[in-house]
Structures are given as structure tokens and as C-alpha cells.
Image (cartoon, coloured by chain):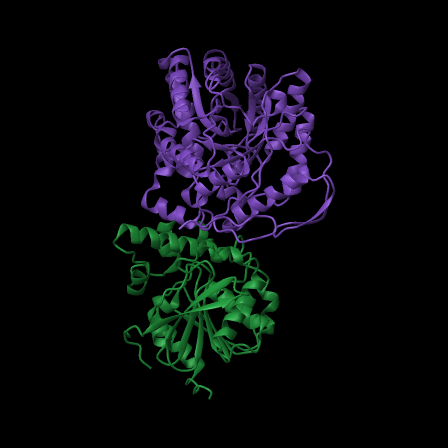
């Protein structure tokens, strides 16, 4: 396994017509090997070094949530309910022709991945959840990222906002027009995903988690200040077959802040990738 | 020109250093209040509105802000119904103007239709029905609505309300946000459909909807009309031209905070501290992240604001704004009757405004000073302003018939949601490139 900086692979894009043609889902695809479906967090899809390393052993499919794709913001208005979101993602997997993909979800994407695996227990082969949202405990409130002032977001997301991975993720374009477009895109993405997390990011997932029938790896940053590491126990209490890895000196986005440790945990959990089925 | 007295019900006894420690909405500790302070703030507010009704204003206007220290008004219909009865009993021909119930917030839209209908009946047909889309903190935080859903919910709720008022037979309503097996409210408004007014902050889609649907458009100058007025009203009238709608000033309402005393010097001396209180501890203490929550502002609006936040005017500096800054930005107009007549008149003439909402109480302004502000405005300022547009040839189609208007019914058209997807209730709106 390599943990050194990898060069970005060739990323292609597919546009999938789903939901009876009412939605066009943009999917970024890279790598070779068995399928890995990556579901992005609330602010939209960013291709990061973790995905690059996953693409060395897997074909990574990263669909963009409705409303988060550049140029197609109003797709969010075509999606009414969380059950519909789950069915839309199932259509995406089926339209891509993926057979038993590994599913990896980060934060909001973790919640969607868990919902998908609970609704369609035979869809994935394994599930990796990176600091997933979706559960709620009165004594451990999840931070409201949608009303966090922009200047406080880095500290909410990262244990060390000055770290290399954090800085790369937080960097904005120099050109003011591009920066405004990037800001607007990120804000709208948070608004689009927020349709299914506001006002409390708990849509009853706890009652459905027992339906997940594949092994689950739950990875958490020990210093996650958006959703505290204590939630790991909540997930494990409901999941039939789970493992947990807590990463030290790490906030809400382990695959960015502690890429090597995250890749190591995921790789160990998934084992040697299977050969692609003929 | 029609002139209403607009008031909020601020808590008037907040500590001097409030804005350094607290926000004015959602999280404000109620322990800052006293029983007597709350009672007198609300009681005086009602007395002041009645004073306005008796002093000859064309209407009395209030609006809705939940969990707010600058306007303790969770439902304007409570006040509207009290004013409706009092004015009817006293024979005062003034519009009852809730500006009003936020439909992006409303989870019980049929109740809004019922409340407005009842107020219209109490008032004998003097209701003007205002529907703001909804402030983000109020709709999203106070009422749990996902920000991206505020506008679609507004659209659906408005369709239901207009239909509930106008359909003769009971009907089932199968909406995305509410479902009713039978809609048949009793009573209906005496006016049939009262004049409908929408409050907006500058989103062109909202303006467009007003043209398409024959609604009035209210712009509230909280951010400083000298900074934002030209941008907003130029946008409004250019869109009117594009829509083939005549530049009838009566389709525009404009809210302005005004403080009038015998002389300019006396006005500043008496009002400055209360104006500073009002804006520093009110709007200025609503943090941006509660006024603009992701999903609530259209993506192109966010992009425009990220490049040029001018639509926000003085808002971003308001928490520490001085009297002079408030005046210079046009957040307030303060002075002698002559000064106020000239400044307000110029503004309304320049931007084609046919309805003025004069906000004459603010912040900590005590009852006696508010009463005098109302009296002076009614006697020394309103009479000349009222003449504006009288000979313009335009007809006021957005005002109750009983009060001299010639109201025309809403028309078919799109909603307030850019890129809305077809539902059976809201027509698809155009997506501009």
C-alpha cells in the first residue's frame, strides 16, 4: 500500500438520466478494479487524495447529489423526500451497472450510504462510513453547519485547519469571478443537501440500521467537532457487523486531514480487492 | 399616495451593551426582560397604532417575527384583529395591513387563509393581505423549514390560500407540503380576494412573480435606501418594462423609518439614541449566518452577493452604526417636517413609489415621543405626500374597494421559486441563462 502523494488519475464524467428523465446525475469515474461508490459530504464532491488512492485498486464512481452539480442547481427541486433520494441512488447504481460495489460515504454521504444499504441490503458488498451524520443524541448535539459563520467552518471541520490537506480543501480561486462562483456553488450545495438534514439531521435512520446486512467500517476523527466521536457507539449498537477505527488528532474529515491513516484503515477492512467479476 | 403607519413591537429596555453580547433573534435570553417591560412595550405599541388610525393614516401595518427581541410579533394577525375591531367600532376607515404572515414559514397555510378572512370580516372589508416569503432565521430556525424549501413552500401555500378564498365549492388539496381532504373555510373575506402584497429584498424572481400575478410589491428599506434604493427600484421597473407592465406607482410599497420633530436639531437630539438602539440592537444584531442560510438565497443571488454585497447596504456595519451613518445610508430619515417631506417626497417621486409605510416607532423610543412622531407626521408631512400621484392618471388596483381602491384579481403566473419543478400547484418558472 502506498501512502505517499499520488498523482491524480484520469477522471471521466458520466451523465446518467434517472428518475424517469427528471434528473441527470453527474458521476465522476476514475481508476480500475472492482467498483467503489463514493458518496460525498454536504458541501459537494471534491476529488481528494483519498479518492485518488482508492482509484489505484478500485474503479471509483462518485455521483453528485442533485443540486450540487455545476450548471444544474435547480435539480434539487425535483427531489422531494429522503425515500426518493434513496431510490434515486439505487437507480444510479443500477444504471451504472455496478454489481455489489463497496460503498464509502463521508458525513452527509455516510448517512445516504447507510440509508441505501438499509433499504437495499444486498446492494453493496461492504460499507465504509467516515464520520457519518444521521443519528442524534440529546446529550451530544450535532453542530449546525448551515448556520456556522464561514470564518468558523474550518475549525468545525478540521482539528488543524492549518494542515496541508485542510488548506488544499479550503483554497479558493484567485479570480474574483471564479471565487464568487465557487462560493455560490458550495453554499447552494450545502442548501441542497440540507433539504434532507434540516433542522435536525435525524430522519429516523436509527430504526433502519439493523437492516444493513454487510460488514461496516466506521471511521471517526477523535476531535470531530461537527459530530462527536461518541456517536461511534450509537452506530455500533445498531449495526450487526461493524468495526470502528478512531483516528487521533483528526477532525470531521479524516480522509483529508489524515489521508494515510484513513486509507490504511479502509484498506485493512476491505482486504485485497477482488478481481472484477467476469 | 397611500400612507400607512408601520410599527414593530421591540422590547424597549435592553441593556446598553446588548449588541456586544447577544443576538437579537433566536438565541436572545428572555431573562433580559422584565414583566413590566414586556407589557408596556406591547401595550404602547397597540396604543400607538390606534393613535395612527385616529390621526388619519390610510392604513396600519405590522408584520411577523418569531423569537425576536426587536419585534415581539409571532403572529401579526393577533394585532390585526384587535385593530380591525377597534377601528371598525370607532368608524375609522383605515386599511388593516398585516405585511404579514410569512408563507415560507407557514406549516398551517389554511389557518392563514382563515385568519385573514376573519380579519377582513371584522374590519368590514379593509384587509390588505401581505405575504412575505420569510426571513431565513424565522422560517428555518424558528419553524424548522429547510432553507431550500422556503420558496417552494411559499408558492404552494399561496396557491392554496388564493384558491381557498375564491373557489365556491369545497375541494381536496394534494400539495407537497400540506394535504387536506376538504378545503372550505368559513368565513371567506368580504372582499373575495383582498389585495395581495409580497415583501421582497431584491430577488428578481419575486418581482417577476408580482408582475405576472398582479400582486403589489413591498420593499422594506432596512438596509439603507440611499445605498440600495436605486439598485432595487431600477431592477424592479426594468423588469416591469420587460414584462409589459405599466409603471403604475401604486403597485410598489416602500417602508422607511422616519423621525420628525419641530426642527432638524431637535429631531436629532430626541431621536438619535433611540434610532441607534433600534438598529444596533435590532437588525444589526441579526448575524449574517442567520439572515442568509445556505439554500435560502438563489445560487445566482449568492454569486452576485459574493462579488458585490451592495444589496445588503449598511447591514454588515449596522451593529455599531452611529446616528450619522444611519442617516447617511438612508436607513432613517430624521428631521423637521420640511426635511422629511422633501427627502421622502424626492425618493418616492424618483423611484415611482405609490405606497409609503412610515415606520414611526423604533428601538427604545418611549411612548410619548412615538405619539408625537405619529402626530407630527400625520399633520405636517402626510398631507402633502398624499398628493403625490393624484394627477398621474394611474389607478390603485391593490387597495380595498371600501377605502377607495379599484382592486383587480390575481392573475395566473409563476411562483417565487427560480427553477421550480412542475407541481400541480405552481407553474414552472423560467430559468434564465
Closer-to-camera residue (B180/B274): B180
Q: In this view, does B167 lie to the left or right of B65?
A: right
| Number of numbered labels in the structure image | 0
Classify the position of the N terminus of chain A by image quarter. Answer: bottom left
Q: In this view, does B405 lie to the left or right of A256?
A: right
Q: Can residue A229 be seen in this view?
A: no
**Chain B shade:** purple
- Image position, residue B165 (x, y; %): 67, 37
Among all residues in the image, which is located at the extreme left?
A174
Question: Considering only vertical position in the picture, is A23 above or below B58?
Answer: below
Closer-to-camera residue (A92/B54): A92
At x 42%, y 66%, the residue is A222
Q: In this view, does B235 lie to the left or right of B217?
A: left
Question: Considering only vertical position in the picture, is B120 above or below B134?
Answer: above
Choose top left, top right, bottom left or bottom right for residue A159: bottom left
Question: Considering only vertical position in the picture, is A95 above or below B423?
Answer: below
- Image position, residue B124 (x, y; %): 68, 24
Choose top left, top right, bottom left or bottom right for residue A236: bottom right
- Image position, residue A35 (x, y; %): 44, 79
Q: Can residue A203 be seen in this view?
A: yes
- Image position, residue A73 (x, y; %): 44, 56
**Chain A shade:** green
At x 54%, y 63%, the residue is A85
At x 30%, y 72%, the residue is A8
Amino acid at each position: 500500500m502506498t501512502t505517499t502523494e499520488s498523482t491524480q488519475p484520469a477522471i471521466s464524467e458520466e451523465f446518467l438520466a434517472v428518475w424517469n428523465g427528471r434528473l441527470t446525475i453527474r458521476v465522476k469515474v476514475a481508476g480500475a478494479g472492482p467498483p467503489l461508490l463514493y458518496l460525498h459530504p454536504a458541501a459537494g464532491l471534491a476529488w481528494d487524495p483519498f479518492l485518488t488512492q482508492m482509484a489505484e485498486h478500485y474503479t471509483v464512481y462518485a455521483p453528485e447529489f442533485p443540486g450540487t452539480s455545476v450548471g444544474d442547481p435547480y435539480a434539487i427541486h425535483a427531489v422531494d423526500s429522503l425515500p426518493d433520494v434513496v431510490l434515486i441512488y439505487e437507480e444510479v447504481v443500477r444504471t451504472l451497472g455496478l454489481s455489489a460495489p463497496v460503498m464509502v460515504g463521508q458525513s452527509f454521504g455516510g448517512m445516504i450510504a447507510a440509508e441505501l444499504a438499509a433499504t437495499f441490503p444486498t446492494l453493496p458488498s461492504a460499507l465504509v462510513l467516515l464520520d457519518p451524520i444521521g443519528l442524534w443524541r440529546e446529550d451530544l448535539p450535532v453542530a449546525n453547519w448551515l448556520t456556522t459563520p464561514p470564518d468558523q467552518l474550518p475549525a468545525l471541520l478540521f482539528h488543524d485547519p492549518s494542515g496541508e490537506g485542510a488548506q488544499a480543501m479550503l483554497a479558493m480561486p484567485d479570480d474574483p469571478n471564479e471565487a464568487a462562483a465557487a462560493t455560490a456553488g458550495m453554499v447552494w450545495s450545502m442548501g441542497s443537501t440540507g433539504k434532507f438534514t434540516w433542522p435536525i439531521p435525524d430522519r429516523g435512520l436509527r430504526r433502519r440500521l439493523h437492516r444493513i446486512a454487510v460488514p461496516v467500517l466506521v471511521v471517526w476523527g477523535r476531535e470531530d467537532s461537527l459530530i462527536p466521536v461518541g456517536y461511534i457507539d450509537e452506530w455500533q449498537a445498531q449495526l450487526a457487523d461493524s468495526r470502528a477505527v478512531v483516528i487521533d488528532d483528526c477532525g470531521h474529515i479524516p480522509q483529508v486531514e489524515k489521508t494515510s491513516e484513513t486509507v490504511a484503515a479502509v484498506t485493512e477492512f476491505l482486504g485485497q480487492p477482488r478481481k472484477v467479476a467476469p | 399616495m397611500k400612507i400607512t403607519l408601520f410599527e414593530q413591537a421591540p422590547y424597549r429596555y435592553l441593556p446598553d451593551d446588548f449588541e456586544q453580547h447577544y443576538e437579537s433573534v433566536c438565541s436572545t435570553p428572555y431573562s433580559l426582560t422584565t414583566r413590566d417591560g414586556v407589557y408596556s412595550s406591547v401595550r404602547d405599541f397597540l396604543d400607538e397604532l390606534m393613535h395612527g388610525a385616529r390621526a388619519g393614516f390610510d392604513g396600519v401595518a405590522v408584520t411577523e417575527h418569531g423569537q425576536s427581541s426587536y419585534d415581539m410579533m409571532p403572529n401579526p394577525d393577533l394585532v390585526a384583529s384587535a385593530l380591525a375591531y377597534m377601528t371598525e367600532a370607532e368608524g375609522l376607515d383605515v386599511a388593516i395591513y398585516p405585511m404579514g404572515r410569512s408563507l415560507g414559514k407557514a406549516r398551517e397555510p389554511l389557518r392563514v387563509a382563515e385568519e385573514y378572512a376573519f380579519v377582513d370580516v371584522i374590519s368590514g372589508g379593509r384587509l390588505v393581505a401581505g405575504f412575505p416569503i420569510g426571513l431565513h432565521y424565522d422560517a428555518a430556525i424558528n419553524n424548522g423549514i429547510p432553507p431550500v424549501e422556503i420558496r417552494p413552500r411559499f408558492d404552494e401555500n399561496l396557491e392554496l390560500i388564493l384558491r381557498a378564498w375564491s373557489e365556491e365549492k369545497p375541494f381536496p388539496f394534494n400539495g407537497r407540503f400540506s394535504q387536506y381532504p376538504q378545503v372550505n373555510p368559513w368565513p371567506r373575506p368580504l372582499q373575495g380576494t383582498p389585495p395581495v402584497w409580497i415583501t421582497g429584498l431584491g430577488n428578481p424572481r419575486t418581482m417577476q412573480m408580482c408582475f405576472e400575478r398582479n400582486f403589489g410589491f413591498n420593499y422594506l428599506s432596512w438596509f439603507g435606501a440611499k445605498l440600495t434604493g436605486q439598485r432595487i427600484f431600477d431592477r424592479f421597473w426594468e423588469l416591469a418594462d420587460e414584462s409589459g407592465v405599466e409603471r403604475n406607482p401604486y403597485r410598489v410599497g416602500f417602508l422607511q423609518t422616519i423621525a420628525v420633530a419641530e426642527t432638524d436639531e431637535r429631531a436629532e437630539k430626541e431621536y438619535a439614541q433611540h434610532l441607534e438602539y433600534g438598529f444596533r440592537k435590532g437588525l444589526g444584531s441579526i448575524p449574517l449566518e442567520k439572515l442568509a442560510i445556505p439554500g435560502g438565497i438563489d445560487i445566482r443571488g449568492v454569486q452576485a452577493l459574493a462579488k458585490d454585497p451592495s444589496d445588503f447596504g449598511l447591514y454588515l456595519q449596522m451593529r455599531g452604526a452611529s446616528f450619522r451613518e444611519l442617516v447617511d445610508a438612508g436607513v432613517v430619515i430624521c428631521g423637521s417636517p420640511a426635511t422629511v417631506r422633501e427627502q421622502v417626497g424626492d425618493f418616492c417621486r424618483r423611484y415611482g413609489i405609490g405606497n409609503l409605510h412610515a415606520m414611526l416607532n423604533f428601538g427604545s423610543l418611549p411612548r410619548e415621543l412615538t405619539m408625537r412622531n405619529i402626530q407630527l407626521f400625520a399633520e405636517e408631512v402626510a398631507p402633502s405626500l398624499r398628493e403625490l400621484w393624484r394627477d398621474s392618471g394611474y389607478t390603485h388596483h391593490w387597495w380595498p374597494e371600501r377605502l377607495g381602491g379599484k382592486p383587480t384579481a390575481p392573475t395566473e403566473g409563476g411562483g417565487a421559486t427560480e427553477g421550480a419543478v412542475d407541481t400541480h400547484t405552481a407553474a414552472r418558472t423560467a430559468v434564465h441563462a
